[in-house]
Amino acid sequence: YQAVVARHSTSVTMTVNGSTRAIGRLFRAVSIAPMIDVTNPHFLQMLRIISPRYTLYTEMIHANAIINNRHDISRFVGDANPDTVVQLGGCEPQAMATAAKIVQDHGFREVNINVGCPSDRVQHGNFGAVLMKSPHVVANILNEMNKKSVNIPVTIKCRTGVDKFDSLEFLQDFIDAQLCSERPPPHFIIHARKCFLQGLSPKQNRNIPPLDYNRVWKTAQKYPDTIFSINGGFKTVETIADALTKVDGCMIGREVMDNPMFLQQLDRGLFSYCARFSLGKTFEDATVIVVHFQQLTFFSAYVDDFLTSKPAGSHLPSMAIMMKPLMMLYRSGYGRRFRRALGEGMTEARKSYPHKCHWDLAPVVYKALEQAKIVDIENDQHCKQASM
């Protein structure tokens, strides 16, 4: 993990209240959060097309799913891209260690343990956020991974607290337990909200408990040799840039789910990087981004390659799942028109080729590209008028 950290050339030290720590030690300081039913391999591929500058987390995959499909884990986590972190869920140390070893053997460079999901289904399996109440279980998972020769980095994503356990001391006691294990995590990603295991849905747990950034800042200061990222409520370039002055990394989730092109705003605002798909906007304009139809071309080529590379009898996702990431590209009125055109193309493809292994993407791509060209032109004209 230190080799990954060392590749980052902008590490600096900062001192707060007499405590000094380094920041900026991650090669990719901004990451995309694991989101169930969102960050599947196809959505992550679209994000790579939009921008290659971010670490991408898979949706949480239970350890047993990896073990029972060890010869074809790509259906859950995609191919082993260097930017991808596989998030595992589970509470049984041997199963978690076996799953991590399988992920490692498939070429992935990092795994993450979910200690933050509050859903009922996850609770009933005794993993996710409920594990914060049993830090020794998480430590045992790390110990078992060490015994099974899991050599890639194993990181942890957790909350600031859970239920009545809502204090700085509780969070830091949890971290202490992991750092004392046989395989101390080099990196903690902390969702800056506590969660309630009873009475709130996962969606409510993302909004109702108040954000407590200070608890994360203080925790990062206490452990200067450990890497910390913060997650929760980051929706603007400015707030993300500010977070990166206090911790090593910032993880964003729902903003990218709702608007994947936000990554290009970050490219410009954080890195002064003009995305190759933009249509000549200035670096200073970090709010107006135009989607270029080439993104659709590249994503469609990815889908075509994905389908044709699968041997006969392989598990194939539905066309709706494969093309769902494109539905998120455009927003507002433009988005409705684009999604309608994409849906019409998918309907035509299903009628012509009812069997998934014989999909013809031509009508889907044609309708999507034609509508994208129109929307891009109209959106560009709107942007020019707004800037006058």
Image (cartoon, grey):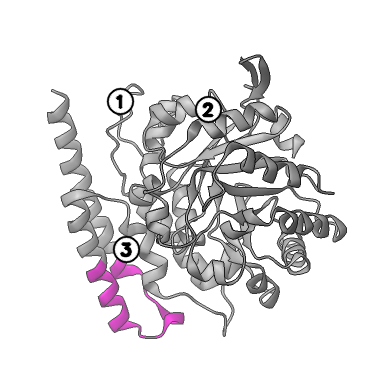
* Pointer 1 or 2: first along the chain: 2
Q: Mark 2, mark 3: which one is toward the viewer? A: 2
CB contact under 8 Å: marks 1 and 3? no
Q: Position of residue 377 (x, y in %)?
A: 19, 42
Q: Quadrant of the N terminus?
A: top right
The amino acid type, in three-letter code, at marker 3 is Val
At x 72% / y 56%, what residue is drawn? Answer: 138
Residue identifier under label 2: 244
Res 53 seen here: no
**Amino acid at dot 1:** Asp
The residue that label 1 is drawn on is: 285
Q: Nearer the viewer, residue 312 or 61?
A: 61
User: Which mark, by number, is residue 365?
Assistant: 3
Q: CA distance from mark 1 to mark 2?
A: 21 Å
Q: Amino acid at mark 2?
A: Leu
- Left or right of 382 in this view: 172: right
Which one is in front in this view, the residue at disc 1 or the one at disc 2?
A: 2
Tag 1: Cα neighbours inside 10 Å, few (<14), some, or many (≥20)?
few
The reply to whether callout 2 and callout 3 are in contact (CB within 8 Å) is no
Answer above or below: position of 146 versus 274: below
Callout 1 touching callout 2 (CB < 8 Å)? no
Observer able to see residue 69: yes
Return the mark for residue 218.
none
The residue at the point 37 percent across, 65 percent down is 323
Residue 124 versus residue 285 in the image, above or below? below
Q: Is residue 25 above or below residue 183?
A: above
